[in-house]
Amino acid sequence: MTSLRFVGDLSIWIGLAIAAVVCVLSWRYYRRESFDLPHRLRWFLPLLRSLAFFLGVLVLTGPVLHHRKIIGELGNVKIYVDASQSMGLLDRHAPVGRKLLIAEQQGWLAADRIDGSLLDLANQLGDIRRTTLQAIQSEDITTEQVRRLSNELLAQLTKTRDALTDESTITPQMLQPLATLASSTDQAAVDESISQLTSLCEVLAPTEQQLRDAFESEAQLLVDSTDESVRAALAMFDETPRWRRAERSLLNTPDALFADLKQHHNVEVIALHNQQPMELLDGLNTTETPSELPATPDAATTDLTSGITSSQDVAAISTQESTDTDAVQASAKTNTAIVLLTDGQHNSGSSPLQTARMLGEQGIPFYTVSYGEARQAPDLAVTGLEHPETVFRKDRVRGAIIVRDRMPVGQPLVAEISHDGEVLWQQQLLTQNTGERRIEFEFGIGELVDRLGSQLAADVKQHAIALALTARIAPLHDEAEPNNNQRTIRLAAITQNYRLLMLDGRSRWETRYLRNVFERDTQWNVNVVIAGQGTDEETLPRGKGSDQFPETRDELFEYDLIIFGEVDATLFVDHELTWIREFVETRGGGIVFIDGQRGRLRQFTEQNLGPLFPVEWLPTSLATQPTILQLTDKGSREPALTFELDSQANQRFWNELPAPHTITNVTALPGAEVLVEAVVDGSPLPAIVTRSYGAGRVLYLACDETWRWRYKAADTYHQRIWNQLAKYVMPRPFSTSDEFVSVDTGPVSYQNGASPDVRIRLLGLDGKPATDATVDALVWKNGRVVSTIGLTPDADVPGIYRGRSGSLDEGEYEVSVRASGYSQDALKARSQFVVLPVESSELENTASNEALLQQMAAESGGVFLREEQMGKLSALLSPLSNGRVVETDTLLWQSYWWFAAIIFLLTLEWFLRKRAGLL
């Protein structure tokens, strides 16, 4: 294969541009003296001179014919480079000896400045020790396998002993038991042999550490010398991330792997970027080896399976399929190998061990190269956050920062939570080096929410303000990775409290306890009105103050929930009862009816509140006391009635609540749903019934004795039950609203790829729900519309429109509304949410996973190496190829042919000029 290259001082494009300019100028200059010549010569003579100049200028680009010839059959080597974020980490915490060996391999330190033989012996001893321990854990190990393992371990110990001058390191007491095991043929003594091998492997661990310590001592002596090149090499290592070291090993070192391998192999370099492989270099098509790889380590996950399997032309063999030996051998590709450069922190996709085993069966071994230090670096990392998704403006935010603490004990640690640089909470602690720890926090957000709310438009109401707070651990000067020290807390601050109106005809126990439940909760504003015969108010008090019924329909509609007790119907005027019915039907509010022994609720007729009730009263009363409460099938599926995760435990919870002493005898109307039943004389009767009515919801309780649920538990369950029931009945608040439209997009943040639900309420000019409009939701990102969602009317709730967006990428979004019959200026409300980036734990774990890479190499029949051993790869891969690549260059710019072409053009021009009578 022959290709044209340009290796001169000028690039081909600059050379062509200069040559073209010179051609045009020379052509114009020489054409001035050819006006009297025939037409052909008038053009041809300047052209010849211009072409000569053109070829002369191109000499500066260094044109070369590159010839590439393949002799024999090349091996196939695919080099996969992990492009995840963890490959961008530094390894300043690595032992000095390893740093110097890697610096030598990178070319920062002169060769042979440090002897790595002791470390090689320690690594070999450690590898065979771990391999032996793993093998003897197999349940079906045989005597032959025990002998083989003993022989391998004995050979390694003998090699180690022979390489050392100190004979006390490997003693005869270590070798003799191994020699005995290696010659044993007693099948019955397998268990005893395994026990002896295990004990010997445990004894060898200190020996391995002694070798490492001896190597480190020699390395430290070299560092303590006055040689500045050693310190410079260490400084280079400390500032070079794993990705750059891998890149240099492939492309830039004196023994660069890519250039070396492509002389005898077909080499490809592929980046593993999340689940996708990215082809970077192809040895057959690369004219010149670049100095950098065209990729960066920015992938949010490490997947050592998907990218490899998708780029390998192999047949998948699963453990469920046939394992016929001949079929496997037929598919084997003995001239193919995979080189994997990674830190081994696999955290996404299927098991890489299964992939290694599958490809190994097809004759494709893994040569895994570990980058990074196996020990965790001294580091602090924020790995998680615990906090509520919503919080009321007046409440305090409570939660915890989950920190992975690997710093030495006793260093000062500052944890803080801030908003745009303003510190809201801070705590000073000490590092503990205990792994994961919780740092609990509590702080108020009232002033922050008030300040943010004052910056919003006055004609748009923000019922919830999204807050993005930064939870941060102040970086320490000697920690490995400061970029993993913070995370974002996203929550919604509810700016308006829920408003509750309680109406009753007497101050019964139920009303007293319910009033306490809601008044003690800061998220509720409670207005209790008690009126009727026998109370302090014989008539219904009306007004704008507390303990008064609202004077106007609009004032009533400002409430979210009404709890309606045994109130005499005669206390209300007709339009007030109409308001209450419209509060549910039109406003979408919730109402809870609590029946009692006086039977006041059944006095209301179809002309006032009668249509709201989900039940019909039976003429006979019950003389027997209920014995137990139980959930219906519908109730057991309702989250508002769920207080235990297990369904059976939740049913027991309701069974154990004190049953009421009396219950009103009712039956549920068609369309209503019974949630809780009371068992009376063995028969279940409706106790809690619900149904939708217009835009709102109605809940009916057939008894007024929920206060008994406080027995022996106080507010533990009573308050929780009523809070959940209240939020079930009342409408979910919209995040923002204006005069005509209210918008809600759910939580303030979604996971990457989520499809948020959009809910809007549209009102007409008369303030009533608009039911006949064509409504779209516009999804905005960075100031432009990225999606339009057609909303469909809610069949059960007039004026409510719903829709769902498509899958969204990370970023900040806004949702506005477009509706037929409304100008865009009229619909001003916009809801905001954030789609979070893919959750990444890449920077939380700073160590390399050598155990995984060793297993991958073993499962596939390959070899495990550390990055300082990269120089061994060429020799290990050489058996794959029985061919070679011969490359030669023809320097055109120095050849006689190029010079002859220029001389020919000038000679031809001179000859034609002479014939035409020119000088």
Image (tube, grey):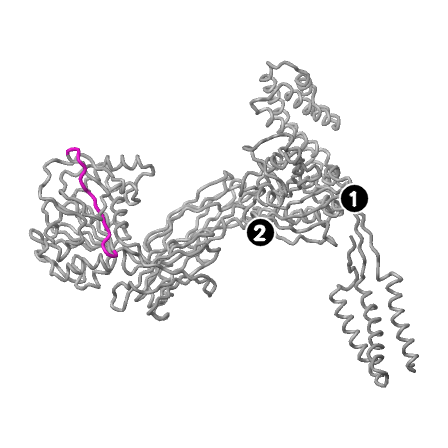
Residue 455 percent across, percent down from the top left? 38, 65
Q: Is residue 484 magenta?
A: no
Residue numbers of the magenta segment: 681-695
> Which residue is at a point 61% across and 43% down the rendered structure image?
308
Q: Position of residue 293 (x, y in %)?
A: 66, 52
- Mark 2 → mark 1, Cα distance in angstroms: 36 Å
Q: Is residue 683 magenta?
A: yes
Q: In terms of secondary structure, where does tag 2 sit?
A: loop
Residue behind mark 2: 298
Is residue 611 in view?
yes
User: Quarter-wise, where is residue 288 in the image?
Assistant: bottom right
Label 1 Cα neighbours within 10 Å, binned few <14 / some 14-19 / many ≥20: some
* SS category of the residue bearing label 1: strand
Q: Is residue 235 in view from this perspective?
A: no
What residue is disc 1 on?
Answer: 884
Viewer-side label of 2, 1: 1
Q: Position of residue 247 (x, y in %)?
A: 67, 49
As drawn, is 465 to the left or to the right of 65?
left
